[in-house]
Amino acid sequence: MHPPQLKALDAWIAQQKPPFPSRPEAVRPLVEMSLARPVCYPKEIAAKAKELASKAIDGLIDPSASVDKKVDRKRRLIKGPSVFRVRVDQSSRDRAEG
């Protein structure tokens, strides 16, 4: 870890109740808390990613396809297969059980 990270870790340890955890002992609950939190991206970042994906897909879709086919293919590519989509309520529950 870099010195600023160690400083922040030591500050977190100092806020805990005695007996204070060692650095390795302190890392585990911090990682667990971080992993339990759903990932939320600012709307601006998500919108920019969607825009970039849309432009990239436009260049890949067969230009001879009908407009309806192009729209359908683009929607399916941007949305992605259902196996890759994780609902926040499911992921939080699964982490709590696991």
Image (tube, rainbow, N blue to C red):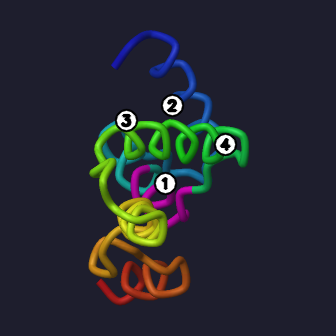
> In the displayed structure, would residue 61 be above or below residue 79?
above
Pointers 3 and 1 in contact (C-beta within 8 Å): no
Q: Give me the disc on residue 89.
A: none
> In the displayed structure, would residue 29 be above or below residue 58?
below
- Image coordinates of residue 61 in percent, x first then y, are 31, 50
Taking 34 as reference, is 95 left or right? left
Which residue, given by chain and number where applicable, does mark 3 sit on?
23
Which residue, given by chain and number where applicable, does mark 2 sit on?
9
- Image coordinates of residue 37 in percent, x first then y, are 54, 63
User: The disc labelled 4 sits on which kind of residue?
Assistant: Gln
Camera-nearest label, 4 or 1: 1
Q: Give me the disc on residue 34.
A: 1
User: The disc labelled 3 sits on which kind of residue?
Assistant: Arg
Q: Earlier in the sequence, mark 3 or mark 1?
A: 3
Seen at 53% across and 28% down, the residue is 10
- Image coordinates of residue 29 in percent, x first then y, are 43, 56
> In the displayed structure, would residue 33 be above or below residue 44?
below
Highlighted magenta segment, given as a residue range: 31-39
Task: Give the spatial CA distance, label 4 vs label 2.
Answer: 10 Å
Taking 36 as reference, is 84 left or right? left
Seen at 53% across and 41% down, the residue is 49
Pointers 3 and 4 in contact (C-beta within 8 Å): no
Which residue, given by chain and number where applicable, does mark 4 sit on?
15
